[in-house]
Image (cartoon, grey):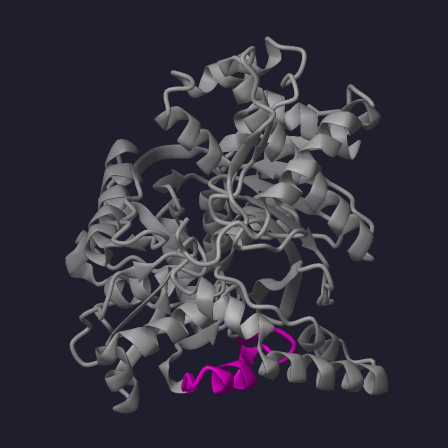
Amino acid sequence: MPRCEEGLASAAAAAMYVLGVDVGSTVLRCHVYDEAAAIRGASSKKVETLHPHVGWVELDPEVLWTQFTGVIKEAVQAAGLHMNQIAGLGISTQRGTFITWNKKTGKPFHNFISWQDLRAVELVNSWNSGLTLKVIRAISTVLHFLTRNDRYLAASCLTFTTHHVSLRLSWVLQNIPEVQQAVNTNNCCFGTIDTWLLYKLTKGSVYATDYSNASSTGVFEPFQMCWSSLLNKLFSIPISIYPAVEDTNHSFGSVDAEIFGVPIPIVALVADQQAAMFGQCCFHAGDVKITMGTGTFWDVNTGNQLHTSRAGLYPLVGWKIGKEVVFLTEGSAADAGSTIKWAKKLDLFTSVEEISRMAQSVVDSEGVCFVPSFSGLQVPVNDPCACTSFMGLKPSTTRNHIIRAMLESIAFRNKQLYDTIVKEVQVPLTNIRADGGVSKNSFIMQMTSDLINEKIDKPVNTDISCLGAAFLAGLALGFWTDKEQLKKLRQTEIVYEPQRDSGEYKLAMDNWIKAVQRSLNWYSHTSH
Protein backbone atom coordinates (compact mmCIF):
# COMPACT_ATOMS: atom_id res chain seq x y z
CA MET A 1 0.00 0.00 0.00
CA PRO A 2 1.43 3.44 -0.92
CA ARG A 3 2.51 5.54 2.05
CA CYS A 4 -0.25 8.19 1.56
CA GLU A 5 -2.93 5.45 1.54
CA GLU A 6 -1.37 3.90 4.66
CA GLY A 7 -1.67 7.27 6.38
CA LEU A 8 -5.31 7.66 5.38
CA ALA A 9 -6.13 4.11 6.49
CA SER A 10 -4.52 4.58 9.92
CA ALA A 11 -6.37 7.88 10.35
CA ALA A 12 -9.64 6.17 9.45
CA ALA A 13 -9.02 3.50 12.06
CA ALA A 14 -8.78 6.17 14.75
CA ALA A 15 -11.72 8.27 13.47
CA MET A 16 -14.70 6.00 12.91
CA TYR A 17 -17.09 8.10 10.86
CA VAL A 18 -17.30 9.29 7.25
CA LEU A 19 -19.12 12.34 5.90
CA GLY A 20 -21.13 12.28 2.68
CA VAL A 21 -22.28 15.68 1.44
CA ASP A 22 -24.60 16.14 -1.54
CA VAL A 23 -25.18 19.53 -3.14
CA GLY A 24 -28.35 18.78 -5.06
CA SER A 25 -30.50 21.04 -7.20
CA THR A 26 -33.07 21.65 -4.46
CA VAL A 27 -31.50 20.40 -1.22
CA LEU A 28 -27.98 20.46 0.24
CA ARG A 29 -27.53 17.69 2.80
CA CYS A 30 -24.83 16.09 4.91
CA HIS A 31 -24.95 12.63 6.47
CA VAL A 32 -22.57 11.17 9.03
CA TYR A 33 -22.10 7.41 8.44
CA ASP A 34 -20.73 4.75 10.74
CA GLU A 35 -19.10 1.47 9.66
CA ALA A 36 -22.52 -0.13 9.12
CA ALA A 37 -23.42 2.75 6.75
CA ALA A 38 -26.08 3.83 9.25
CA ILE A 39 -26.79 7.56 9.39
CA ARG A 40 -25.62 8.80 12.80
CA GLY A 41 -26.35 12.48 12.14
CA ALA A 42 -27.87 14.53 9.35
CA SER A 43 -28.54 18.09 8.34
CA SER A 44 -30.05 19.69 5.26
CA LYS A 45 -30.81 23.10 3.82
CA LYS A 46 -32.83 24.24 0.84
CA VAL A 47 -30.66 25.29 -2.10
CA GLU A 48 -31.70 28.85 -2.89
CA THR A 49 -31.90 29.61 -6.60
CA LEU A 50 -31.98 33.09 -8.11
CA HIS A 51 -33.89 34.10 -11.24
CA PRO A 52 -32.52 37.53 -12.26
CA HIS A 53 -34.11 37.27 -15.71
CA VAL A 54 -36.73 35.03 -17.27
CA GLY A 55 -35.11 31.67 -18.04
CA TRP A 56 -32.00 32.37 -15.96
CA VAL A 57 -31.20 30.16 -12.96
CA GLU A 58 -28.30 31.08 -10.66
CA LEU A 59 -26.87 30.27 -7.22
CA ASP A 60 -25.12 32.79 -4.98
CA PRO A 61 -21.65 31.28 -4.30
CA GLU A 62 -21.29 32.85 -0.85
CA VAL A 63 -24.72 31.62 0.27
CA LEU A 64 -23.87 28.14 -1.02
CA TRP A 65 -20.54 28.16 0.83
CA THR A 66 -22.21 29.21 4.08
CA GLN A 67 -24.84 26.48 3.68
CA PHE A 68 -22.22 23.86 2.82
CA THR A 69 -20.07 24.48 5.88
CA GLY A 70 -23.23 24.87 7.97
CA VAL A 71 -24.71 21.44 7.17
CA ILE A 72 -21.40 19.74 7.95
CA LYS A 73 -21.16 21.39 11.36
CA GLU A 74 -24.83 20.67 12.13
CA ALA A 75 -24.67 17.02 11.02
CA VAL A 76 -21.60 16.31 13.14
CA GLN A 77 -23.21 18.04 16.10
CA ALA A 78 -26.46 16.10 15.56
CA ALA A 79 -24.43 12.87 15.68
CA GLY A 80 -23.03 13.91 19.05
CA LEU A 81 -19.50 13.85 17.64
CA HIS A 82 -16.47 16.09 17.37
CA MET A 83 -14.76 16.98 14.10
CA ASN A 84 -11.66 14.99 15.03
CA GLN A 85 -13.79 11.83 14.90
CA ILE A 86 -14.40 12.30 11.16
CA ALA A 87 -12.12 10.12 9.05
CA GLY A 88 -12.79 11.86 5.77
CA LEU A 89 -15.18 13.66 3.47
CA GLY A 90 -16.82 12.71 0.15
CA ILE A 91 -18.60 15.40 -1.87
CA SER A 92 -21.37 14.80 -4.42
CA THR A 93 -22.58 17.77 -6.47
CA GLN A 94 -25.16 18.68 -9.07
CA ARG A 95 -23.57 18.59 -12.50
CA GLY A 96 -23.08 21.25 -15.13
CA THR A 97 -23.55 24.17 -12.72
CA PHE A 98 -20.43 26.31 -12.99
CA ILE A 99 -18.69 29.49 -11.98
CA THR A 100 -15.56 31.39 -13.05
CA TRP A 101 -13.32 33.33 -10.72
CA ASN A 102 -10.19 35.45 -10.55
CA LYS A 103 -7.16 33.20 -10.17
CA LYS A 104 -5.22 35.81 -8.16
CA THR A 105 -7.93 36.99 -5.78
CA GLY A 106 -10.31 33.99 -5.73
CA LYS A 107 -13.23 36.39 -6.27
CA PRO A 108 -16.04 35.06 -8.51
CA PHE A 109 -16.82 36.98 -11.70
CA HIS A 110 -20.50 36.01 -11.51
CA ASN A 111 -22.95 33.74 -9.71
CA PHE A 112 -23.08 30.01 -10.38
CA ILE A 113 -24.97 29.42 -13.62
CA SER A 114 -27.22 26.41 -13.07
CA TRP A 115 -27.58 23.41 -15.35
CA GLN A 116 -31.26 24.43 -15.53
CA ASP A 117 -30.40 27.88 -16.93
CA LEU A 118 -31.74 28.67 -20.41
CA ARG A 119 -29.85 31.88 -21.28
CA ALA A 120 -27.86 30.05 -23.97
CA VAL A 121 -30.84 28.51 -25.77
CA GLU A 122 -30.44 30.83 -28.78
CA LEU A 123 -26.76 29.89 -29.03
CA VAL A 124 -27.72 26.22 -28.77
CA ASN A 125 -30.27 26.51 -31.55
CA SER A 126 -27.87 28.51 -33.71
CA TRP A 127 -25.07 25.96 -33.34
CA ASN A 128 -27.35 22.96 -33.83
CA SER A 129 -28.71 24.39 -37.09
CA GLY A 130 -25.46 26.00 -38.27
CA LEU A 131 -23.14 25.01 -41.09
CA THR A 132 -20.14 24.25 -38.82
CA LEU A 133 -21.92 21.47 -36.97
CA LYS A 134 -23.33 20.05 -40.21
CA VAL A 135 -19.80 19.86 -41.63
CA ILE A 136 -18.49 18.18 -38.45
CA ARG A 137 -21.30 15.63 -38.58
CA ALA A 138 -20.76 14.93 -42.28
CA ILE A 139 -16.99 14.47 -41.96
CA SER A 140 -17.43 12.34 -38.85
CA THR A 141 -20.00 10.15 -40.63
CA VAL A 142 -17.50 9.44 -43.41
CA LEU A 143 -14.69 8.77 -40.92
CA HIS A 144 -16.91 6.39 -38.95
CA PHE A 145 -17.81 4.53 -42.15
CA LEU A 146 -14.12 4.15 -43.00
CA THR A 147 -12.80 3.35 -39.51
CA ARG A 148 -15.80 2.04 -37.52
CA ASN A 149 -14.41 4.05 -34.62
CA ASP A 150 -17.21 4.96 -32.17
CA ARG A 151 -15.51 8.26 -31.44
CA TYR A 152 -16.47 9.41 -34.94
CA LEU A 153 -19.97 7.99 -34.56
CA ALA A 154 -20.37 10.15 -31.44
CA ALA A 155 -19.19 13.23 -33.36
CA SER A 156 -21.58 12.43 -36.24
CA CYS A 157 -24.49 12.61 -33.76
CA LEU A 158 -23.18 15.70 -31.92
CA THR A 159 -25.97 17.94 -30.63
CA PHE A 160 -25.68 20.72 -28.10
CA THR A 161 -28.10 21.30 -25.22
CA THR A 162 -28.51 23.98 -22.58
CA HIS A 163 -27.60 21.42 -19.90
CA HIS A 164 -24.04 21.20 -21.17
CA VAL A 165 -21.53 23.74 -19.89
CA SER A 166 -20.13 24.46 -23.36
CA LEU A 167 -22.53 27.08 -24.72
CA ARG A 168 -23.39 28.59 -21.33
CA LEU A 169 -19.65 29.16 -20.83
CA SER A 170 -19.44 30.56 -24.35
CA TRP A 171 -22.28 32.94 -23.43
CA VAL A 172 -20.31 34.08 -20.36
CA LEU A 173 -17.23 34.83 -22.46
CA GLN A 174 -19.33 36.80 -24.93
CA ASN A 175 -21.34 38.78 -22.38
CA ILE A 176 -19.17 39.31 -19.30
CA PRO A 177 -16.08 41.32 -20.40
CA GLU A 178 -14.17 40.72 -17.14
CA VAL A 179 -14.17 36.97 -17.78
CA GLN A 180 -12.85 37.28 -21.33
CA GLN A 181 -10.21 39.72 -20.13
CA ALA A 182 -9.15 37.31 -17.37
CA VAL A 183 -8.99 34.46 -19.90
CA ASN A 184 -6.75 36.60 -22.14
CA THR A 185 -4.35 37.25 -19.25
CA ASN A 186 -4.42 33.64 -17.94
CA ASN A 187 -6.14 34.83 -14.76
CA CYS A 188 -9.41 32.88 -15.03
CA CYS A 189 -10.40 29.70 -13.20
CA PHE A 190 -13.39 27.64 -14.28
CA GLY A 191 -15.09 25.19 -11.98
CA THR A 192 -18.21 23.18 -11.45
CA ILE A 193 -19.47 23.18 -7.86
CA ASP A 194 -17.11 20.40 -6.74
CA THR A 195 -14.05 22.27 -7.98
CA TRP A 196 -15.07 25.53 -6.37
CA LEU A 197 -15.86 23.89 -3.02
CA LEU A 198 -12.51 22.07 -3.09
CA TYR A 199 -10.76 25.36 -3.86
CA LYS A 200 -12.56 27.07 -0.96
CA LEU A 201 -12.08 24.19 1.51
CA THR A 202 -8.33 24.16 0.86
CA LYS A 203 -8.03 27.97 0.91
CA GLY A 204 -7.09 28.00 -2.77
CA SER A 205 -4.30 25.42 -2.56
CA VAL A 206 -6.07 22.69 -4.60
CA TYR A 207 -7.69 23.26 -8.02
CA ALA A 208 -9.09 20.02 -9.40
CA THR A 209 -12.15 18.01 -10.38
CA ASP A 210 -12.81 14.30 -10.95
CA TYR A 211 -13.60 12.32 -14.10
CA SER A 212 -17.31 11.93 -13.33
CA ASN A 213 -17.85 15.68 -13.00
CA ALA A 214 -15.63 16.52 -15.96
CA SER A 215 -17.44 14.07 -18.23
CA SER A 216 -20.78 15.72 -17.36
CA THR A 217 -19.80 19.15 -18.69
CA GLY A 218 -20.07 18.52 -22.43
CA VAL A 219 -16.53 19.85 -22.98
CA PHE A 220 -14.76 16.63 -21.99
CA GLU A 221 -13.65 13.87 -24.38
CA PRO A 222 -14.56 10.55 -22.71
CA PHE A 223 -12.91 8.46 -25.45
CA GLN A 224 -9.55 10.08 -24.67
CA MET A 225 -10.31 10.95 -21.02
CA CYS A 226 -9.30 14.60 -21.33
CA TRP A 227 -10.78 18.03 -22.00
CA SER A 228 -11.96 18.22 -25.62
CA SER A 229 -9.57 20.25 -27.76
CA LEU A 230 -12.04 20.21 -30.69
CA LEU A 231 -15.03 21.59 -28.79
CA ASN A 232 -12.99 24.17 -26.93
CA LYS A 233 -11.44 25.41 -30.18
CA LEU A 234 -14.93 25.68 -31.67
CA PHE A 235 -16.03 27.91 -28.79
CA SER A 236 -12.70 29.74 -28.45
CA ILE A 237 -12.23 28.49 -24.90
CA PRO A 238 -8.59 27.87 -23.88
CA ILE A 239 -7.94 24.51 -22.18
CA SER A 240 -5.84 26.38 -19.61
CA ILE A 241 -8.94 27.60 -17.73
CA TYR A 242 -9.97 24.05 -16.76
CA PRO A 243 -8.88 22.25 -13.57
CA ALA A 244 -6.80 19.10 -13.39
CA VAL A 245 -8.87 15.90 -13.58
CA GLU A 246 -8.23 13.29 -10.89
CA ASP A 247 -9.62 9.88 -9.89
CA THR A 248 -13.05 9.91 -8.25
CA ASN A 249 -11.73 8.73 -4.92
CA HIS A 250 -8.39 10.42 -4.52
CA SER A 251 -6.49 12.26 -1.82
CA PHE A 252 -7.51 15.79 -2.84
CA GLY A 253 -5.93 17.34 0.23
CA SER A 254 -7.46 18.36 3.56
CA VAL A 255 -9.93 20.97 4.67
CA ASP A 256 -8.02 23.94 6.07
CA ALA A 257 -8.00 23.56 9.85
CA GLU A 258 -9.41 27.07 10.36
CA ILE A 259 -12.75 26.04 8.80
CA PHE A 260 -13.78 23.15 11.08
CA GLY A 261 -11.06 23.28 13.73
CA VAL A 262 -9.22 20.23 12.40
CA PRO A 263 -7.95 19.21 8.93
CA ILE A 264 -10.40 16.70 7.44
CA PRO A 265 -9.19 14.65 4.44
CA ILE A 266 -11.16 15.26 1.23
CA VAL A 267 -11.04 11.86 -0.47
CA ALA A 268 -13.86 11.79 -3.02
CA LEU A 269 -15.42 14.16 -5.52
CA VAL A 270 -18.26 12.76 -7.61
CA ALA A 271 -21.14 14.01 -9.75
CA ASP A 272 -24.52 13.46 -8.11
CA GLN A 273 -25.99 10.90 -10.55
CA GLN A 274 -22.77 8.90 -10.58
CA ALA A 275 -22.75 9.11 -6.76
CA ALA A 276 -26.27 7.70 -6.71
CA MET A 277 -25.17 4.91 -9.04
CA PHE A 278 -22.34 4.03 -6.66
CA GLY A 279 -24.57 4.34 -3.60
CA GLN A 280 -27.07 1.94 -5.21
CA CYS A 281 -24.19 -0.55 -5.70
CA CYS A 282 -24.81 -0.63 -9.46
CA PHE A 283 -21.29 -1.94 -10.01
CA HIS A 284 -21.92 -4.32 -12.91
CA ALA A 285 -22.66 -3.87 -16.60
CA GLY A 286 -26.44 -3.85 -17.11
CA ASP A 287 -27.24 -2.43 -13.68
CA VAL A 288 -29.72 0.46 -13.92
CA LYS A 289 -30.33 3.34 -11.54
CA ILE A 290 -33.32 5.72 -11.72
CA THR A 291 -32.96 8.89 -9.69
CA MET A 292 -36.13 10.94 -9.45
CA GLY A 293 -35.35 14.23 -7.79
CA THR A 294 -35.77 17.64 -9.41
CA GLY A 295 -35.41 15.75 -12.69
CA THR A 296 -35.37 12.07 -13.60
CA PHE A 297 -32.09 10.40 -14.55
CA TRP A 298 -31.81 6.88 -15.94
CA ASP A 299 -28.22 5.60 -15.82
CA VAL A 300 -27.03 2.27 -17.18
CA ASN A 301 -23.67 0.76 -16.28
CA THR A 302 -22.02 -0.13 -19.61
CA GLY A 303 -18.86 -1.50 -18.02
CA ASN A 304 -15.61 -0.53 -19.71
CA GLN A 305 -17.37 0.31 -22.99
CA LEU A 306 -18.62 3.76 -23.96
CA HIS A 307 -22.07 3.71 -25.56
CA THR A 308 -22.54 6.02 -28.52
CA SER A 309 -26.15 7.08 -28.95
CA ARG A 310 -28.15 8.27 -31.94
CA ALA A 311 -31.16 9.20 -29.80
CA GLY A 312 -29.44 11.57 -27.39
CA LEU A 313 -28.39 9.27 -24.54
CA TYR A 314 -25.27 10.74 -23.00
CA PRO A 315 -22.00 8.84 -22.40
CA LEU A 316 -20.44 9.47 -18.99
CA VAL A 317 -17.57 8.37 -16.84
CA GLY A 318 -19.28 6.76 -13.86
CA TRP A 319 -16.14 6.69 -11.77
CA LYS A 320 -12.42 6.12 -12.07
CA ILE A 321 -10.72 4.31 -9.22
CA GLY A 322 -7.11 3.53 -10.04
CA LYS A 323 -7.06 1.50 -13.25
CA GLU A 324 -10.80 0.80 -13.10
CA VAL A 325 -12.88 3.06 -15.35
CA VAL A 326 -16.64 2.46 -15.40
CA PHE A 327 -18.77 4.12 -18.07
CA LEU A 328 -22.46 4.94 -17.97
CA THR A 329 -25.02 5.98 -20.54
CA GLU A 330 -27.71 8.37 -19.36
CA GLY A 331 -31.11 9.61 -20.41
CA SER A 332 -32.86 12.35 -18.48
CA ALA A 333 -36.09 14.27 -18.08
CA ALA A 334 -35.56 17.66 -16.46
CA ASP A 335 -38.89 17.89 -14.66
CA ALA A 336 -40.05 15.38 -12.05
CA GLY A 337 -39.81 16.78 -8.53
CA SER A 338 -40.02 20.28 -10.03
CA THR A 339 -43.48 19.36 -11.35
CA ILE A 340 -44.69 18.29 -7.91
CA LYS A 341 -43.09 21.36 -6.33
CA TRP A 342 -44.95 23.58 -8.81
CA ALA A 343 -48.26 21.84 -8.02
CA LYS A 344 -47.64 22.45 -4.31
CA LYS A 345 -46.93 26.12 -5.03
CA LEU A 346 -50.36 26.34 -6.71
CA ASP A 347 -51.98 24.76 -3.59
CA LEU A 348 -53.20 21.76 -5.59
CA PHE A 349 -52.37 19.67 -2.50
CA THR A 350 -51.32 20.34 1.08
CA SER A 351 -48.77 17.58 1.78
CA VAL A 352 -46.63 15.41 -0.46
CA GLU A 353 -47.90 12.32 1.35
CA GLU A 354 -51.46 12.84 0.04
CA ILE A 355 -50.77 13.06 -3.69
CA SER A 356 -50.63 9.29 -4.30
CA ARG A 357 -53.98 8.96 -2.54
CA MET A 358 -55.43 11.80 -4.64
CA ALA A 359 -54.27 10.14 -7.86
CA GLN A 360 -55.63 6.77 -6.81
CA SER A 361 -59.00 8.24 -5.81
CA VAL A 362 -60.01 8.53 -9.49
CA VAL A 363 -59.96 5.69 -12.03
CA ASP A 364 -58.11 7.81 -14.60
CA SER A 365 -57.27 11.42 -15.39
CA GLU A 366 -60.54 11.80 -17.33
CA GLY A 367 -58.54 12.53 -20.48
CA VAL A 368 -56.42 15.29 -18.93
CA CYS A 369 -52.80 15.26 -20.09
CA PHE A 370 -49.91 17.17 -18.54
CA VAL A 371 -46.62 17.80 -20.36
CA PRO A 372 -43.76 18.42 -17.86
CA SER A 373 -41.48 20.77 -19.77
CA PHE A 374 -40.40 23.66 -17.55
CA SER A 375 -36.85 23.09 -18.84
CA GLY A 376 -37.72 21.66 -22.25
CA LEU A 377 -38.03 17.99 -23.18
CA GLN A 378 -34.94 15.83 -23.31
CA VAL A 379 -34.38 12.27 -24.62
CA PRO A 380 -35.93 11.02 -26.83
CA VAL A 381 -37.87 14.19 -27.77
CA ASN A 382 -34.92 16.60 -27.54
CA ASP A 383 -36.74 19.93 -27.79
CA PRO A 384 -35.51 22.72 -25.47
CA CYS A 385 -38.33 24.97 -26.72
CA ALA A 386 -41.23 22.68 -25.77
CA CYS A 387 -43.74 24.18 -23.34
CA THR A 388 -45.35 22.89 -20.18
CA SER A 389 -49.05 22.35 -20.85
CA PHE A 390 -52.34 20.91 -19.70
CA MET A 391 -54.63 19.49 -22.36
CA GLY A 392 -58.04 17.89 -22.18
CA LEU A 393 -59.37 20.01 -19.31
CA LYS A 394 -63.16 19.88 -18.89
CA PRO A 395 -65.77 21.44 -16.60
CA SER A 396 -65.84 18.11 -14.74
CA THR A 397 -62.06 18.07 -14.16
CA THR A 398 -61.15 18.02 -10.47
CA ARG A 399 -57.92 18.57 -8.56
CA ASN A 400 -57.57 14.79 -8.30
CA HIS A 401 -57.70 14.43 -12.09
CA ILE A 402 -55.07 17.16 -12.46
CA ILE A 403 -52.77 15.58 -9.86
CA ARG A 404 -53.17 12.17 -11.49
CA ALA A 405 -52.30 13.62 -14.91
CA MET A 406 -49.17 15.23 -13.46
CA LEU A 407 -47.98 12.02 -11.78
CA GLU A 408 -48.80 9.98 -14.90
CA SER A 409 -46.65 12.33 -16.97
CA ILE A 410 -43.59 11.46 -14.86
CA ALA A 411 -44.27 7.74 -15.33
CA PHE A 412 -44.80 8.23 -19.08
CA ARG A 413 -41.44 10.00 -19.35
CA ASN A 414 -39.91 7.03 -17.50
CA LYS A 415 -41.44 4.70 -20.09
CA GLN A 416 -40.01 6.80 -22.94
CA LEU A 417 -36.53 6.71 -21.39
CA TYR A 418 -36.71 2.98 -20.70
CA ASP A 419 -37.79 2.20 -24.28
CA THR A 420 -34.98 4.36 -25.67
CA ILE A 421 -32.39 2.60 -23.49
CA VAL A 422 -33.66 -0.89 -24.38
CA LYS A 423 -33.60 -0.02 -28.09
CA GLU A 424 -30.13 1.51 -28.07
CA VAL A 425 -28.01 -0.08 -25.37
CA GLN A 426 -26.66 -3.50 -26.28
CA VAL A 427 -25.98 -4.47 -22.66
CA PRO A 428 -28.79 -6.65 -21.20
CA LEU A 429 -30.46 -4.78 -18.34
CA THR A 430 -30.36 -6.54 -14.97
CA ASN A 431 -31.14 -4.84 -11.65
CA ILE A 432 -33.25 -1.66 -11.74
CA ARG A 433 -33.00 0.48 -8.63
CA ALA A 434 -34.71 3.77 -7.83
CA ASP A 435 -33.94 6.64 -5.47
CA GLY A 436 -34.57 10.35 -5.00
CA GLY A 437 -37.45 12.12 -3.31
CA VAL A 438 -40.00 11.28 -6.03
CA SER A 439 -39.28 7.55 -5.61
CA LYS A 440 -41.20 7.81 -2.34
CA ASN A 441 -44.37 8.30 -4.42
CA SER A 442 -45.97 4.86 -4.64
CA PHE A 443 -48.28 5.82 -7.53
CA ILE A 444 -45.41 6.86 -9.82
CA MET A 445 -43.30 3.87 -8.81
CA GLN A 446 -46.05 1.30 -9.36
CA MET A 447 -47.15 2.82 -12.67
CA THR A 448 -43.54 2.90 -13.89
CA SER A 449 -43.11 -0.78 -12.95
CA ASP A 450 -46.32 -1.61 -14.84
CA LEU A 451 -45.33 0.39 -17.92
CA ILE A 452 -41.85 -1.12 -18.26
CA ASN A 453 -42.91 -4.57 -17.00
CA GLU A 454 -39.90 -4.77 -14.69
CA LYS A 455 -39.22 -5.01 -10.95
CA ILE A 456 -37.90 -1.82 -9.36
CA ASP A 457 -35.95 -1.96 -6.10
CA LYS A 458 -36.17 1.07 -3.79
CA PRO A 459 -33.72 1.28 -0.87
CA VAL A 460 -34.45 2.31 2.70
CA ASN A 461 -32.41 5.48 2.24
CA THR A 462 -33.51 7.33 -0.90
CA ASP A 463 -31.02 10.21 -0.44
CA ILE A 464 -28.49 7.96 -2.06
CA SER A 465 -25.99 10.48 -3.49
CA CYS A 466 -24.74 11.21 0.03
CA LEU A 467 -24.19 7.51 0.57
CA GLY A 468 -22.39 7.11 -2.76
CA ALA A 469 -19.99 9.94 -1.91
CA ALA A 470 -19.41 8.38 1.51
CA PHE A 471 -18.86 4.91 0.00
CA LEU A 472 -16.21 6.29 -2.37
CA ALA A 473 -14.53 8.20 0.45
CA GLY A 474 -14.67 5.17 2.73
CA LEU A 475 -13.01 2.93 0.15
CA ALA A 476 -10.19 5.45 -0.27
CA LEU A 477 -9.71 5.59 3.49
CA GLY A 478 -9.85 1.82 4.06
CA PHE A 479 -12.98 2.50 6.16
CA TRP A 480 -14.67 -0.17 4.01
CA THR A 481 -12.66 -2.87 2.29
CA ASP A 482 -14.29 -3.44 -1.10
CA LYS A 483 -17.48 -3.28 -3.15
CA GLU A 484 -18.68 -6.65 -1.92
CA GLN A 485 -18.82 -5.24 1.59
CA LEU A 486 -20.73 -2.21 0.29
CA LYS A 487 -23.35 -4.45 -1.36
CA LYS A 488 -24.08 -6.02 2.03
CA LEU A 489 -24.60 -2.57 3.56
CA ARG A 490 -27.27 -1.48 1.07
CA GLN A 491 -30.81 -2.14 2.35
CA THR A 492 -33.95 -2.63 0.24
CA GLU A 493 -37.19 -1.15 1.56
CA ILE A 494 -39.61 -2.32 -1.16
CA VAL A 495 -39.53 -3.99 -4.58
CA TYR A 496 -42.25 -2.81 -6.95
CA GLU A 497 -43.46 -5.55 -9.27
CA PRO A 498 -45.74 -5.18 -12.32
CA GLN A 499 -49.41 -5.48 -11.30
CA ARG A 500 -51.16 -4.35 -14.47
CA ASP A 501 -50.51 -5.13 -18.11
CA SER A 502 -48.77 -2.21 -19.80
CA GLY A 503 -51.38 -2.40 -22.56
CA GLU A 504 -53.96 -1.04 -20.12
CA TYR A 505 -52.17 2.29 -20.28
CA LYS A 506 -51.96 2.43 -24.08
CA LEU A 507 -54.87 4.82 -24.69
CA ALA A 508 -53.73 7.20 -21.93
CA MET A 509 -50.13 7.19 -23.15
CA ASP A 510 -51.14 7.64 -26.80
CA ASN A 511 -53.14 10.72 -25.80
CA TRP A 512 -50.23 11.97 -23.73
CA ILE A 513 -47.82 11.58 -26.67
CA LYS A 514 -50.30 13.58 -28.79
CA ALA A 515 -50.22 16.31 -26.14
CA VAL A 516 -46.40 16.25 -26.20
CA GLN A 517 -46.38 16.70 -29.98
CA ARG A 518 -48.62 19.75 -29.66
CA SER A 519 -46.30 21.27 -27.05
CA LEU A 520 -43.17 21.15 -29.19
CA ASN A 521 -41.28 24.17 -30.52
CA TRP A 522 -43.58 26.51 -28.60
CA TYR A 523 -40.89 29.00 -27.66
CA SER A 524 -38.43 30.64 -30.01
CA HIS A 525 -36.10 31.78 -27.20
CA THR A 526 -35.84 31.94 -23.40
CA SER A 527 -39.21 33.57 -22.83
CA HIS A 528 -40.19 30.51 -20.80
On the rendered structure, is 243 left or right of 317?
left
Q: Let me know if residue 221 is in the magenta part.
A: yes
| Residue placed most toward the observer, 92 or 376 | 376
Q: Is residue 364 visible?
A: yes
Image position, residue 443 (x, y; %): 61, 21
On the rendered structure, is 422 left or right of 28?
right
| Residue placed most toward the observer, 384 or 150 | 384
Q: Which residues are magenta?
A: 220-239
The residue at the point 75 percent across, 31 percent down is 451
The image quadrant of residue 156 is bottom right
Image position, residue 216 (x, y; %): 52, 64
Q: Is residue 165 visible?
A: no
Image position, residue 131 (x, y; %): 60, 82
Q: Let me know if residue 285 is in the magenta part.
A: no
| Residue placed most toward the observer, 72 or 380 | 380
Look at the picture and state if 315 lies above or below 393: below
The image quadrant of residue 341 is top left
The residue at the point 41 percent across, 83 percent down is 237
The residue at the point 28 percent across, 50 percent down is 51
